Amino acid sequence: MVDLDNGVIRFTCEHCEVSLTVDDFLAGVSAPCPSCGKPTKAPDHRPKGGSSDVFSGRKPQQQVGRPSVGQGVEQGRDWDTGRPRKQPRRVVSEVQGEREEVALVIRLLVVGMIVLAVVLAAGYYVYQAFNS
């Protein structure tokens, strides 16, 4: 199963059948599956040969130049084109995402229990101080 949506590719690992989501610029890239650890490849459904001009049938020519030594390029921009770089999203399986959510909820519950214990202890000591 492959689903292309808003610059995101959704597909399943061919080894463990876990649903994965990656940015479209990672199409065709192999990486270890976060769930099983075996190498899996994001499907590449990009058109071959780039886009062409609809009216003339020719590919548009783009001038690409590197900045001179003194200019420099802003951080987070591509060296050749000067366009902003896409920040890669973390590849997370649905199972791993659910585990992280459960861990977060458990941490919040533990912190809440600690705060409750501190408030009750403080209340107990204040009560003892006024009644003695």
Image (spheres, helix red, strand yellow):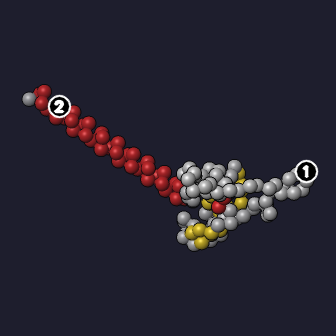
| Picture quadrant where residue 94 is located | bottom right
Please say if 116 is above or below 104.
above
Q: Amino acid at mark 1?
A: Phe
Secondary structure under tag 2 reads helix
Given residues 78 and 30, the one toward you in this image is 78
Identify the disc placed on residue 126: 2
* Mark earlier in primary sequence (1, 2): 1
Given residues 60 and 54, the one toward you in this image is 60
What x and y, as percent, mark residue 30?
Answer: 62, 69
Q: Are marks 1 and 2 in contact (CB under 8 Å)?
A: no
Rendered residue at 57%/59% (across/down)? 91
Is residue 113 visible in the rendered structure shown here?
yes
- Say whether residue 126 is left or right of residue 58: left
Q: Amino acid at mark 2?
A: Val
- Say whether residue 14 is left or right of residue 35: right
What x and y, as percent, mark residue 101?
Answer: 48, 51
Residue at the far right: name it: 56
What x and y, as percent, mark residue 86?
Answer: 61, 53
Rendered residue at 60%/72% (across/down)? 39
Secondary structure under tag 1 reads loop
The residue identified by callout 1 is 55
Rendered residue at 65%/50% (across/down)? 83
Identify the disc placed on residue 23: none
Given residues 127 and 80, the one toward you in this image is 80
- Say whether residue 13 is left or right of residue 46: left
| Picture quadrant where residue 131 is located | top left
Name the quarter where the N terminus is drawn. Answer: bottom right
